[in-house]
Image: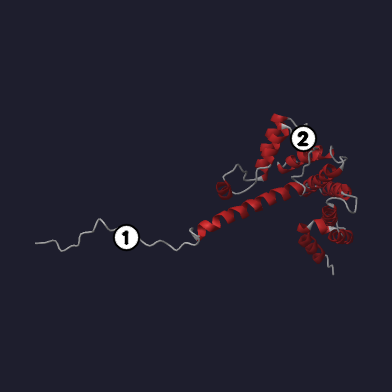
Amino acid sequence: MADDKVKPDPSKPKAVPPTPVQLGGESLVDRLLPHLKKIMIGTILLAVVLGIVFGVRAYKHSKEEQTTEKFGSVMRVAGRPVVSKEQAEQLKMETFETYKARAAAVLTEMQKQGTGHTTAAFRGGVYLDNGDLDKAIEELKKGVDDKDLDGVLARENLGIALESKAAAEPDATKRQALYTEALDAFTKMQPADDGVRRAYALYHTGRVQLKLGKSAEAKASFEKAKAAGADASDLAELIERRLANLGAS
């Protein structure tokens, strides 16, 4: 009996199952991934830059120092972003999970390379990230008289370190003294009305004045910070919240 089944004709191409619709020769996911990665990397880099500039991770170095290998070795470690494990896997680059872990790695590299090529503001910021407040304060005090941005950042970091130490101090008298010392650092941080980070200096001053119970003075500091905040757009919302809580119009 003849076979009723129709045998395939080898001269005809085999049928190909239908595939999902693609746009522009690639799937929608494929088209989005590069943009998502760019957005993620841009966000992380921005966070790193802001974190370094905003107090605890501040530093500045000369053009001569930029050319030294020792300085470059330290900066390469300090420049690695702090991200989650998931983000690190997608970035495919060396990262850290916490700022403290990064600070510990930077300190290790500084021990290898020496610290003569770094500024007091930078060293103090690294110790601050590592949780060593006393060492941070010791280093930052060495830089409070430095000129230009170095001195501004050293005074800012010093105020933050003293404020952090005050918050952890159980003795009320010592806590008050530390807050007062922090206020002095922030008050001296940027005395020039048109100086760099002037708005941040006034904002920090207002925060600590509040902790010392000086509400009227704090309100005045926040108002000045608002007026000086043209180059500190990231502070605008924070200042508005503070003023709203103090009953500002």
Identify the disc placed on residue 81.
Answer: none
**In the picture, residue 98 is in which quadrant?**
top right
User: 93 left or right of 70?
Assistant: left
Residue ID at (79%, 64%): 240
- Of 40 and 131, nearer the camera is 40
Task: Find out whether the residues at labels 1 and 2 contact each other: C-beta distance under 8 Å.
Answer: no
User: 19 left or right of 166?
Assistant: left
| Position of the C terminus by quadrant | bottom right
- Of 115 and 61, nearer the camera is 61
Q: Residues within 10 Å of mark 1 (few under 14, many from 20)?
A: few
- Of 226 and 32, nearer the camera is 32
**In the picture, residue 139 is in which quadrant?**
top right
Element type at mark 1: loop
Measuring from the top left, give residue 20's x and y in whole percent: 43, 62
Q: Which residue lies furthest to the bottom in this view?
A: 249
Q: How crowded is mark 2: few (under 14 residues within 10 Å), some or many (20 or more)?
A: some
Residue at the disc numbered 1 = 15
Residue at the disc numbered 2 = 65
Element type at mark 2: helix
- Of 249 and 180, nearer the camera is 249
Judge whether 46 appears above or below 114 on screen: below
Measuring from the top left, give residue 199's x and y in whole percent: 84, 55
**In the picture, residue 142 is in which quadrant?**
top right
Q: Specify the amino acid type for callout 1.
A: Ala
Judge whether 77 appears above or below 203 on screen: above
Q: Residue furthest left?
A: 1
Q: How many dots with numbers?
A: 2
Q: Specify the amino acid type for callout 2.
A: Glu
Q: Distance between the residues labelled 1 and 2?
A: 66 Å
Measuring from the top left, give residue 243's x and y in whole percent: 82, 64
